Image: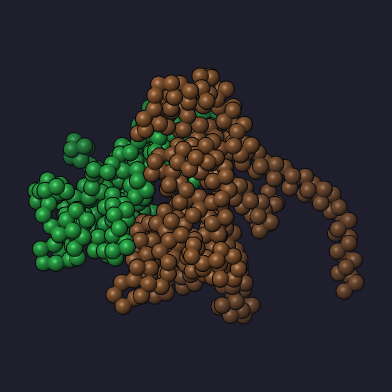
Amino acid sequence: MTVEEGRLSPPRLNAARRFVRSYLERPAGLAGLGVLAAFGLLALCAPLFIGDAQLNVIKVTGPQLAGPSGSYLLGTDQAGRSIIDLVIWGSRESLSIGIIATVLTVLLGTTVGLLAGHYEGWVGKGLMHVTDWFIALPSLPLAISLAAVLGRGAASITIAIAVTSWTATARLVRAQTLAVEARPFVDRARALGAGNTQIMLRHVLPNVTPLVLVSSTLTVASAILSEATLTFLGLGDPTSVTWGSMLQSAFSDGAVTAGAWWYLLPPGIAILIVVLGFTLTGRAVEHVLNPRMVGRS
Amino acid sequence: MSSTAATGTVTGRETSSRPVSGRFELLTYLGSKLAAAVVSFFVTLVIGFTIFSLMPSDPVRTLTRGRPTSEAQLAHLRLQLGLDKPIWERFLSFVNDTLHFRLGYSWQFQQSVSSLVADRLWPTLLLMGTAMILSVTLGLWLGVRSGWRQGSLFDRIASSTSLTLWSVPTFWLGMILLVVFSVGIGPIPSLFPAGGMSDPALPQSGFGHYVDVARHLVLPCLTMVLVVFAQYVTIMRSSIIDELGSPYLLTARAKGLTDADVRRKHATPNALLPSVTMIFMQLGTLVSGAITVEAVYSWPGLGYLTYQALQIPDLPLLQGTFVVFSASVIIMNFLADVVYRYLDPRVRAQ
């Protein structure tokens, strides 16, 4: 990558500059990016000031389910842990599950989409049929069933999210592959003797990648929502702290009937802000790359 | 008057072969859509079978996880579930059972899954139906309004509200509403019941019962509407914006129609078509909403049944709800295709 950057041709550099400039003109996109950077930094630095002493239910010393006070800014949970520490700590696993699930989704979707777009015969048709079948299935019951059979934990939630959300990427990549392969340079490459693999990997994939990256920011947003939902329904690892698991224990340990709003609000607002951050960033990039989209949602 | 009637009969005679071929076309259209629905249901069964019967390395161990069982009991269970038979034979008997609505036996309730599903169907239909009607009405209305005056204050408020509500987890919104309106917070008294579908202390029939059910319905329904209508706003808004530049709107304005009439009589009907398809395509999100909302409010429907099954986990029950949810979405999509043909003459012409 560094070698490539050194050899950036002026037009490409100009395009990058233009991209940055028009992105800077979108306040919503900037706000989204800022929020994501803040949360990312907080998640990375969390181990510096939160440790076992704040997270272990046996070692903490705070009052049980107490409202916000001077020493506990956002109050405490039923074990006496500080809510603000839990929310910060929870961002680590919530964000990483969201991002890993997105990487899996994108890999699976791009592979299927590329193959379906490149091989026009029965392979392409078959793959599109499989995609359509998965689109028709309601995603939450499918994800629940998969995660329940695989056993509780982050890994099975991640797999369940990937299996239920790759279809959108696959359709997008297939459409783009068809568009790219219709262009003359692909014919030229084929005339020069390029094989299927070379055409797909060296000519089509680089042209598809920007679009996939944009759509993946929106995928992260929905993956984080799905993680919270699946964990809330009881499919997460009971010992780990995520925003979903906080809400799940708040619900099952009677924070709702106790009216403990300080326990319920922070994790939900954290999810809301991060999901909004990813959505706004994704939309801003989309608008910059595709000006015709401006004005549409 | 008579001349128009005459031309009517003339054109009718000229195109007398049309209705026959039209009926044939209708049959082929319905047939192909029905075939597609049947194939997708079959694929659903394959996926369900793969998840619940092939993926666990030993289904009997998964089923009996966490409870003491002897080797003899395990062997008996294997025989009872037919695990000694080859895979294709097990799959065929699974398909046969499902088609006859024999969905297995719930471990948790000690009752057949089909009877549980039948008991819980009506509450879910009530909740999903009410929520869908309200959110479609609200979403389409807001979408038309904000798309028509794109960039106005109304549009910005409606769009940002729906984006925010889309970014909120359904179950979280449900819990917040529960704390605010059911438990009561600060000056707000407890307005609505916290869960269930009716108060067991009250008589289970008559007018009073309906009022009671309606009171229990308010909060779950509100939660679903708030999360779901946002999508409809977005869909309807962008399809109205697609119509904005169309020449026929200019013609309508040139005829001297008021702005409201141009919007109501010309733009909205055309923009409705793509929106209707999208609404039916996104029924799956309504199902997801039902599962989480019913879990929060312990609304005794299929979603709550799924939630109860998950806590064990009660795999036969989960398999049953998976099949029922998938089948209902497939049926609704098929109905959408049928309705769409009547709504859009262009589909008929194809």
Percent x, y for residue A116? 48, 34
Does residue A168 appear in the picture of this structure?
no
Residue at (50, 53) in percent of width and height: B301
Does residue B257 appear in the picture of this structure?
yes
Percent x, y for residue B284? 49, 50
Q: Nearer the viewer, residue B102 or B328?
A: B102
Q: Is residue A271 above or below residue B56?
A: below
Q: Nearer the viewer, residue A38 or B122?
A: B122
Total residue callouts: 0
A281 on left or right of B214: left
Residue at (77, 49) in percent of width and height: B22
Q: Nearer the viewer, residue B41 or B208?
A: B208
Q: Is residue B56 above or below residue A164?
A: above
Residue at (32, 63) in percent of width and height: A257
Quick one: which chain is green?
A
Percent x, y for residue A40? 20, 51
| Quarter placement of the N terminus of chain A | top left
Apparent colour of chain B: brown
| Quarter placement of the C terminus of chain A | bottom left
Q: Is residue A287 above or below residue A223?
A: below
